[in-house]
Image: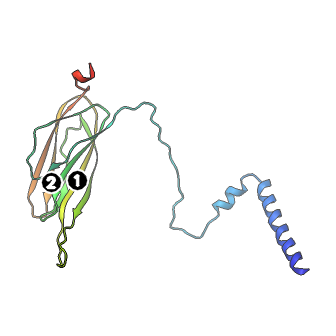
Amino acid sequence: MSQKVCIAAVTCVIITTVAMLLSVPGRWAQAADKDTGRKDEPKEELKEFTRAKMLGRLRLYHPVPIGGPYPYLLYTARTGDLVQLQLSYPISPPFPKSVSVRYNPAYFDVIDVVGTANEVVILKPGEAQTGVIGLGYYSVYLKAKRDGRTSVQVPVEFEDGDTETVPFNFQIGPEPKTPRHGR
């Protein structure tokens, strides 16, 4: 009998607590906001970003080797486009130490320069080996601001002090008319 009384008392306490929390507006939020004892976690604040009109696109171009050859290409973009320029380098010393961007601020805003390393390990059965081959990449992100012709240079400084500058030429403006699209 005492076990049934105990279960009934616990059930009554739970029902009373839930009823009390539901009867007072905001009580659930207050219970959720109670300090958990962790002072190192910042409170999460969500922000919203909405774009009513799409002003640009993402332009991705093939990687250009840092050591050359540098093909003379005229890269195209429209005002508002986000452009990704990729530079590739072999995974062998000397490695790139820093990457800079020289540009005309009237035509572009630099968003960021980020690096990724891709590597492949070639192993032969039965032999203990070390060594990595493959390519690493740096990506330069630019935002096109106005129509015109301009150039972007990306100097890369290596660990041994050598510097290579990779050139990019741009035409920012309307899409060229092509017979395929009938424009």
Give the labeled residue for mark 1: 138
* Residue 177 against residue 59 in the figure, above or below: above
* Residue 125 against residue 147 in the figure, above or below: below
Q: Which residue sits at x=9%, y=49%?
A: 68
Locate residue 162, reporting x and y percent: 8, 58
* Residue 119 against residue 148 in the figure, above or below: below
Amino acid type shown at disc 2: Val
In the rendered image, the residue lying farthest to the front is 125
* Location of the N terminus (image quadrant): bottom right
* Location of the C terminus (image quadrant): top left
- Tell me if I can see residue 177 in this picture: no
* Left or right for 91, reference 12: left
Locate residue 180, reporting x and y percent: 24, 23
Q: Secondary structure at mark 2?
A: strand
Real-space Cα separation, disc 2 to disc 1, in angstroms: 10 Å
Amino acid type shown at disc 1: Tyr
Q: Badge 1 local density, few (<14 within 10 Å), some, or many (20+)?
A: many
Q: Badge 2 local density, few (<14 within 10 Å), some, or many (20+)?
A: many
Give the labeled residue for mark 2: 156
Badge 2 or badge 1: first in the primary sequence: 1
* Left or right for 33, reference 64: right
Q: Which residue sits at x=33%, y=36%?
A: 57
